[in-house]
């Protein structure tokens, strides 16, 4: 791949990697602040965004291994966000 003609594809890939980096960076910051291991909700949003951009990158590169990996990961991130939302709704109904 010639970098000068595919800069936009590299940008998509690096954007996805940036979101994946941010999920762990933010998790580390929050855990340090609370002095215990914490997975904040933004961890799952960063994961989903990273997965989305890396999936686009993989589709454009026609990399089936990467496509399968990012697709299945996205399902896990969406499921976790759903479970968090469901718990918040349940707690709001309780009072």
Image: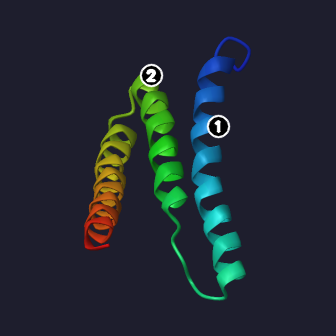
Answer with mark 2 or mark 1, whichever residue precedes in sequence.
1
Q: Residue at x 28, y 56 (%)?
A: 79
Q: Answer above or below: position of 79 versus 74.
A: below
Q: Quadrant of residue 32?
A: bottom right
Disc 1 secondary structure class: helix
Q: Depth check: give the residue in front, 86 or 79.
A: 86
**Residue tagged 2:** 60
Which residue occupies the extreme front position in the image? 95
Q: Quadrant of residue 82?
A: bottom left
Q: Residue at x 60, y 47 (%)?
A: 19
CB atoms of marks 2 and 1 within 8 Å: no
Which numbered marker is on residue 14?
A: 1
Question: Which quadrant would the N terminus be assigned to in this image?
Answer: top right
Which residue occupies the extreme bottom position in the image? 35
Q: CA distance from mark 2 to mark 1?
A: 14 Å
Percent of width and height locating residue 86: 26, 61
Q: Residue at x 32, y 42 (%)?
A: 71
Q: Going by the image, does 4 lie left or right of 22?
A: right
Percent of width and height locating residue 26: 65, 63
Q: Answer above or below: position of 46 versus 91.
A: above
Q: Depth check: give the residue in front, 72 or 78.
A: 78
Instruction: Say if residue 5 shows up in the picture.
Output: yes
Question: Which quadrant would the C terminus be assigned to in this image?
Answer: bottom left
Which numbered marker is on residue 52?
A: none
Percent of width and height locating residue 17: 60, 45
Q: Depth check: give the residue in front, 1 or 14.
A: 14
Instruction: Say if residue 1 shows up in the picture.
Output: no
Q: Depth check: give the residue in front, 21 or 42.
A: 42
């Amino acid at each position: 791949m010639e970098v000068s003609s595919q800069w936009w594809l590299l940008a998509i890939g690096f954007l996805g990697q940036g979101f994946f980096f941010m999920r762990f960076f933010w998790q580390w910051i929050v855990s340090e602040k609370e002095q215990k291991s914490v997975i904040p909700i933004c961890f799952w949003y960063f994961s989903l965004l990273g997965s989305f951009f890396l999936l686009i990158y993989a589709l454009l590169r026609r990399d089936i291994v990467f496509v399968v990996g990012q697709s299945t990961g996205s399902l896990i991130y969406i499921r976790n966000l759903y479970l968090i939302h469901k718990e918040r709704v349940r707690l709001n109904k309780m009072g």
